[in-house]
Image: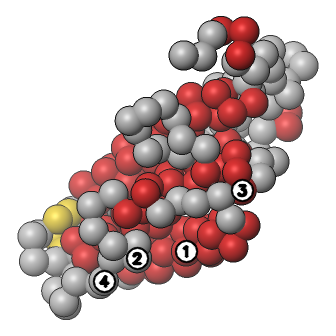
Amino acid sequence: MERMSDQPGRWSRATVYPDMWADPDDDPRNSEGVSSDGELATLRDFLADYRMTLRMKCEGLDAEQLARRSVPPSTMSLLGLLRHLAEAERDWRNWISDADPLAKLYGEKDADFDGAVAEQAEVDAAYSALEREQAETDAALARHPDLSERLGKGGTSVRELMVHRIEEYARHCGHADLLRERIDGRVGQ
């Protein structure tokens, strides 16, 4: 059993607010200033910020750290989250398509987490897959700017899918906060 003394000390790169990931002036996310006009632009901004947050939580870590599991019996890791969200992006395209479903990237059930091994090639592949799948889902949705439009065999509305995507990234950014703190003690907003 791990003791508290075995845990890394909590820290932050922020100097102004010690409980933040980065000082507000250094934070690349769209958290200051005038917000976007319109519902679709607002949803896209929130999604972009959560995607960036996930990447920020993974910055500066090596393959072993990214693949490090949370606590048994969980198989969750930061690398697993990258792989899982690439899989989710692909699956969301299945929701809005009338075509045959795209094949899974990593296999059935929890293969996205189970296969997250501490190898740099696996890390590079996960980042590439996530970037590719995000771009393809974004492109598919860009053809449907009407948030009320219903797509695919299940009739999912564009609005529902956009909100679900934000929810999925936000939930996993919370997991990423805890995983990162367990790895090296870094905390953040």
Callout 4–callout 3 Cβ contact below 8 Å: no
Residue 44 coordinates in the image, percent (x, y): 49, 56
Find residue 63 and name its label: 3
Residue 56 in the image: above or below residue 17: below
Comparing 178 with 64, the one in front is 64
Q: Quadrant of the C terminus?
A: top right
Residue to which mark 4 is pinned: 103
Amino acid type at image mark 2: Leu
Amino acid type at image mark 1: Ala
Amino acid type at image mark 4: Ala
Q: Please, what secondary structure does the residue beneath circle 4 have?
A: loop
Residue at 64% from the left image edge and 28% from the top image edge: 182
Residue at the far front in the pictured view:
1
Q: CA distance from mark 4 to mark 3?
A: 26 Å
For mark 1, does the 10 Å Cα neighbourhood hold few (<14), some (14 to 19), or many (20 or more) residues? many
Please tell me which of labels 1 and 4 falls first in the chain: 4
Residue at 66% from the left image edge and 27% from the top image edge: 181
